[in-house]
Image (cartoon, grey):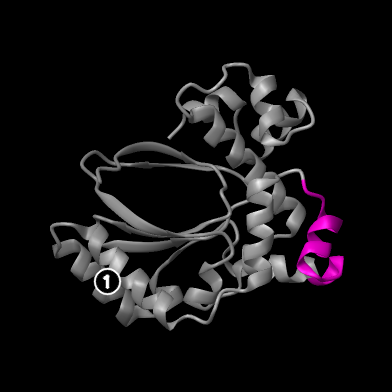
């Protein structure tokens, strides 16, 4: 896809592997705050996205190592694999198919997903106001054990994960066709206690007021 221009990336607890048509490939680690970047005219890019908490097990890293970092793919999977991926994507009529093929290979070779990690992400995706103590009970762990498992998988603890997934829930609701225009209503639907709560998270995590994030790419 053509990816020229300026982009704002709001944290979503995912990890992306990105190919850019300048002959490079990157791993974008989990973020705790939004960041912006610009690509020159005519730039093409595509990638694959690993669901929250999965990429570390698939690609073989501790998520804290890549938190708030973008590193060359070679640093994660090795120079040979990264070079072959870039060469094939550069020459392919549909680079996304190359990325998907590599992602399937990595997934097939990966160890099974951590059921605790999947459970935590699933609960917060459905009920973003769930407290950390309740998450620990659901996972069958103590709060400290849960925190350690979350930090290793997501790059941060369950409280930060909850804030990020709650903001993403708000953005999905707000961008849905026919969504209410009232921010207070949307904030309540997303699990915020009130509209000021939404504004705080929007600025601290997304780097902009809620309406600006809704319209950003």
Nearer to us in this view, 136 or 145: 136
Q: Residue at x 63, y 16 (%)?
A: 182
Relative horizontal placement of residue 83, taking residue 119 as reference (left or right) = left
Q: Residue at x 30, y 64 (%)?
A: 99
Relative horizontal placement of residue 11, taking residue 8 as reference (left or right) = right
Residue 211 appearing in the image: yes
- Residue 203: x, y in percent? 66, 32
| Position of 91 relative to 198 (above/below) | below
For residue 37, what is the image quadrant?
top left
Q: Is residue 33 magenta?
A: no
| Image: magenta residue range | 130-145
Residue 155 appearing in the image: no
Query: Which element type, helix, strand or loop, lies under badge 1?
Result: helix
- Residue 60: x, y in percent? 52, 78
- Residue 103: x, y in percent? 36, 69
Nearer to us in this view, 137 or 156: 137
Residue to which mark 1 is pinned: 85
Relative horizontal placement of residue 44, taking residue 135 as reference (left or right) = left
Dominant secondary structure, magenta: helix
């Amino acid at each position: 896809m053509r990816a020229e221009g300026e982009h704002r990336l709001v944290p979503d607890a995912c990890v992306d592997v990105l190919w850019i048509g300048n002959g490079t490939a990157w791993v974008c680690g989990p973020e705790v705050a939004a960041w912006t970047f610009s690509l020159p005219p005519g730039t093409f890019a595509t990638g694959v996205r690993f669901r929250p908490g999965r990429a570390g097990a698939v690609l073989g890293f501790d998520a804290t190592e890549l938190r708030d970092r973008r590193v060359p793919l070679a640093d994660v999977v090795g120079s040979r694999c990264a070079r072959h991926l870039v060469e094939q994507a550069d020459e392919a009529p549909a680079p996304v198919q190359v990325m998907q093929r590599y992602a399937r290979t990595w997934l097939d070779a990966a160890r099974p997903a951590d059921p605790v990690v999947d459970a935590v992400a699933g609960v917060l995706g459905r009920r973003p106001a769930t407290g950390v103590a309740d998450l620990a009970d659901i996972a069958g762990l103590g709060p400290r054990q849960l925190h350690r498992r979350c930090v290793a998988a997501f790059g941060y603890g369950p409280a930060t994960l909850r804030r990020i997934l709650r903001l993403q829930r708000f953005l999905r609701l707000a961008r849905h066709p026919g969504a209410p225009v009232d921010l207070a209503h949307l904030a309540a639907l997303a699990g915020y206690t009130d509209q000021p709560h939404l504004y705080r998270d929007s600025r601290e995590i997304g780097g902009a007021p809620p309406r600006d994030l809704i319209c950003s790419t």
